[in-house]
Image (cartoon, grey):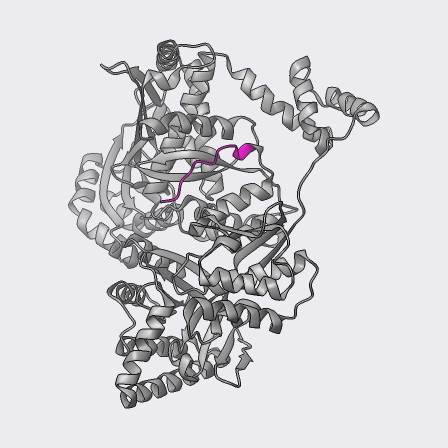
Amino acid sequence: MKKARFPGFYRLPITERLRQIYDQGWLNERDLNSLSNGEHILPADRADKMIENVVGVMGLPIGLGLNFRVNQKDYLVPLVVEEPSIVAALSAAAKTFLPSGGIHATADESLLIGQIQVVNPPDPEQARNQILFHRDELLAKLNKLHPSMVQRGGGAKDIEVRIFDHTDQTPLMVVVHLLVDTCDAMGANLINTMCEEIAPDVEALTGGRVFLRILSNLTDRSIVRANVAIPTKQLEGKGYAGEEVRDGIILASQFAAVDPYRAATHNKGIMNGIDPLAIATGNDWRAIEAAAHAYAAKDGQYSSLTRWFADDEGNLIGEIEIPIKVGITGGSLQANDTTRITYRLLNVDTARELAELMAAIGLAQNFSAIKALSTEGIQKGHMSLHARSVAVSAGAPKQHFETIVSRLIKQKDISVNAAKKIINELTITGKPVEVKRKSSTTAMANGKVILLGEHAVVYGKPALAVPLKNAVLAEVSDSNQPPEIHVPAWDIDDKLEQSNSVWWQAIQDVFQTLDVADQNFSVHVKPNIPAAMGLGGSAAMAVAIIRAVSKHFEIELTDDETNKFAFQCEKAAHGTPSGIDNTIATFGSPLVYRSGEQQQIDILEMPKPIKLVIGISDRPSLTVDMVAAVRDRSRAHRSLYDALFNNFEQVTESGIEAITKGDYQQLGQMMTINHGLLNAIQVSSPELDRMVQIASDHGALGAKLTGAGGGGSIVALADDNSEAIARALTNRGFKALQVIV
């Protein structure tokens, strides 16, 4: 289970923050590169297709709310907001909630309302009765518009009718409400389409004239509730007793409950948390705002959306009740690359889960705001962060930044002019801050996915493989100790001279050959793929380490030399490897590989990218054991296995032809047949078979185990349905990785 705790995160440079969340599995390698290089920013030409009269794109900061645990699941919460203190306040609140289990949130139902306005019907009661009498027919007609949504459990669920009597200002009106479950879509366009569809029927049934046909943003059929319990011990600090803080929060809550002037600011604080998450996920934050504020006045007076009180044990209890209807699918979400990354970070499976998280965020932000108000005041924390924004605006040099911020706060004049004066003083008289760091060198290597031909490749048959780009990063740093290798993600921490591992001994042999074994240095390895899952992790690690060490000591190595060294390590790890893992780790291109005395490598040119979903089990796959087992069985049943390996060859050659022609339907069929052959040589497992079946059931063009088998991973060839396949795998307890090659 991924954790949302990152102590000292705010002190790190952006690159290291990205690296940490990448190392913990919150981001994939594509997302890391995109955020590092700014490639996620919406291009102007794409923006031009989203709204009218585009002249540019405005940027806003993306911060991460840390420490969040909602319904026993940890979240990193992406927040798009320009106001200082919000992200810090949310993270602090979530940290306060952690010891008591975090926040609990529920969403009972999730319906949108579409409204059809009927003006001056001859008999409003008869109009109501006619609509309700034909309710089932109308619902059936609506649900024919979106059969796929109905299949997922959504669609039009009910119809209600409201009557508004004639007044001096308004005519007699009958208003028809369509109650629709839009599943994971935001649903505005869907609702409006439904209203338009049955407007003529409504007009005919009521005898009135239909005017407006549009959704309502008062989503009071999508109510989300969240609550938290906080022992007073968790509230004490900064000279305040826990009971004192609790009682102050309760008084602030009571103030907002009775006074609309206070409630407006109180609820704005709630939306300070919800809106940034809505923006980060591409949802309509204006609609969410409208619904929240309308709901706050549901009892005839505008009031608070939260309630804080003490339970019988003296704990502080917080509750929020708020309408939230959001989506996680749809064109507007998919048009922006940034939302793809934010959803990766969030790791939510349904729109309901996102709504529950939003309510939890709103409750946390409300807690943070009224806690500050009832203790030290809001300005202290807010202005310290404001000072940082001012320092940036004034052009504060990096080496003097913290000094400038500190002086601004101390002198209580937080302005650009004051910051510029401090900068001038430091530029003339100040000494630069010395930054001491050890020299370091990094290198990357690729993992692999075998599409066709594993195991048979050991016996001279071809195999088709594609790379997992930048699967492993190795960083070499100067040290005062003999060579050490650290791979925290794989629980590896070895001093090479003391290690009994044959793999490390092989690496040590490489260092001897490179004449660096007597040097003092440390290697930190940061993999983006799990160990022992059939994805070429050990080969990628070998290549990354060899490249980083050679670069660090300015030793020129060709790719062929790197590949040979990595193969030595693979032989130490796996006994009789084919050589395909180290080859693709080194060269990083789709290739056809044939082992043997005359190793043959053919780089493949693909006419179009392929989309893959990798399903990862929790069961390790030990290549050395699986290869040995197949070898034993092939020796015992030589003629049978020779025939099977010939079938492998035919399937692989057919797949190679398919991929070069861009015929991915044919490639998928060959992958599925290949899985059957792998079952025949007894290297699959129930977990792998189950994942293959799940992928096939959700539209994969083909699916098979990849790697040695016995555990590890499967690979599914997707069309435009990689998200659905990945979601299906994760919903059933497996991990999933989406890859474009």
Q: Main secondary structure of the magenta part?
A: loop
- Quarter holding residue 461: bottom left
Is residue 498 positioned above or below 570 on the image? above
Residue 5 within the magenta-colored segment of the rendering: yes
Residue at left offset 49%, top offset 81%: 661
Is residue 172 positioned above or below 620 on the image? above
Q: Which residues are magenta?
A: 1-10
- Please indicate whether residue 406 sits to the left or right of residue 687 in the image: right
Residue at left offset 28%, top offset 46%: 181
Q: Residue 347 at x, y = what percent?
A: 39, 46
Q: Looking at this rendering, what residue extends furthest in the right direction?
A: 428
Q: Nearer the viewer, residue 300 or 172?
A: 300
Residue at left offset 44%, top offset 22%: 368
Is residue 657 positioned above or below 588 on the image? below
Q: What number of labels is visible? A: 0
- The quadrant of the rendering that contains the N terminus is top left
Q: Residue 485 at x, y = what percent?
A: 52, 52
- Please indicate whether residue 284 sits to the left or right of residue 551 in the image: left
- Quarter holding residue 2: top left
Residue 241 within the magenta-colored segment of the rendering: no
Q: Can residue 302 be seen by looking at this rendering?
A: no
Q: Residue 117 at x, y = what percent?
A: 33, 39
Q: Nearer the viewer, residue 508 or 568?
A: 508
Q: Can residue 79 be seen by looking at this rendering?
A: yes
Is residue 530 positioned above or below 399 on the image? below
Residue at left offset 27%, top offset 50%: 155
- Quarter holding residue 247: top left
Q: Nearer the viewer, residue 369 or 439?
A: 439
Q: Residue 340 at x, y = what percent?
A: 48, 50
